């Protein structure tokens, strides 16, 4: 018996580990696509499983879903992402992940000191305001970090 090239939403959910609602969400966001049968049931091509594996890996690495979608946008629809495709995608994320690793390592290394002093002071905390460089801008909150290291300004 030949294996069907199409999968139902339940089969994709079971094989990918994503809830059906997540599959619908990813479809609305353009990360995956389906087509409808004559009975109006969703059917997915098998390449969707690889695309979902990339979605899972990207989000587990902390890559925003919009960036995962952008990376997947370079893979033609209906084409099963290959190892070469993955290399290209991961290169897009490499610098961001390196920056995140440096920040997380610094935070981990300095976290015990913050817990020990208990202050988490925005004027002297080495994690939030190293060297008190924000003091020149006045008192009160000055910065919240966005994804990618950009600052929101107050």
Image (tube, rainbow, N blue to C red):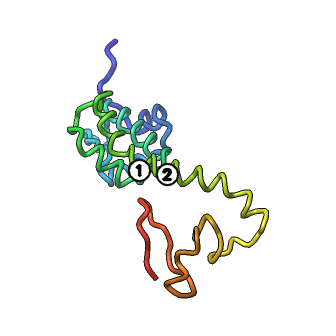
Answer above or below: position of 100 versus 4.
Answer: below
Question: Closest to the observer: 149 or 132?
Answer: 132
Q: Is residue 129 positioned above or below 77 on the image? A: below
The picture places residue 134, in percent across and down from the top left corner, at: 52, 78
Viewer-proximal residue, 1 or 71? Answer: 71
What residue is pinned by disc 1? Answer: 96
* Crowding near the residue tagged with mark 2, few <14, some 14–19, many ≥20 C-alpha atoms within 10 Å: some
Q: Is residue 43 above or below residue 117?
A: above
Q: Name the residue located 58 percent from the left edge and 75 percent from the top edge.
A: 132
Quadrant for residue 92, please give it: top left
| Helix, strand or loop under label 1 | helix
Residue carrying label 2:
100
| Residue found 38% across the figure and 33% down from its top | 49
Instruction: Determine the residue positioned at 33% across, 40% down.
Output: 91
The N terminus - image quarter: top left
Tell whether label 2 touches label 1 (CB within 8 Å): yes
Taking depth in this image into account, of 145 and 69 the one nearest to the observer is 145
Disc 1 crowd, CA 10 A, few/some/many (<14, 14-19, 20+): some
Secondary structure of the residue carrying tag 2 is helix
Task: Say left or right for 82 vs 124.
Answer: left
Q: CA distance from mark 1 to mark 2?
A: 6 Å
Q: Residue furthest left?
A: 76
Residue 97 in picture, x, y percent from top left: 45, 47
Q: Is 18 displayed left or right of 74 in the figure?
A: right
For residue 138, side relative to residue 66 (left or right): right
Q: Is residue 92 above or below residue 119?
A: above
Residue 141 position, x and y percent, is 55, 81
Q: How many marks on residues? A: 2
Residue at 50 percent of width and 75 percent of height: 143
Q: Residue 144 placed where, x, y %?
A: 50, 72
The outermost residue toward the bottom is 138
């Amino acid at each position: 018996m030949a294996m069907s090239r199409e999968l139902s939403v339940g089969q994709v959910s079971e094989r990918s580990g994503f809830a059906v609602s997540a599959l619908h969400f990813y479809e609305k966001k353009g990360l995956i696509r389906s087509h409808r049968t004559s009975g109006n049931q969703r059917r997915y091509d098998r390449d969707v499983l690889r695309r979902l594996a990339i979605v899972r890996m990207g989000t587990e690495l902390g890559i925003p879903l919009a960036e995962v979608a952008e990376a997947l946008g370079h893979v033609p629809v209906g084409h099963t992402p290959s190892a070469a495709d993955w290399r290209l995608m991961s290169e897009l994320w490499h610098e961001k992940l390196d920056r995140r690793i440096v920040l997380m390592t610094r935070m981990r290394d300095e976290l015990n000191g913050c817990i020990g002093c208990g202050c988490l002071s925005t004027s002297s905390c080495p994690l939030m305001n190293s060297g008190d460089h924000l003091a020149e801008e006045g008192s009160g909150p000055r910065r919240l970090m966005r994804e990618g290291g950009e600052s929101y300004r107050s």
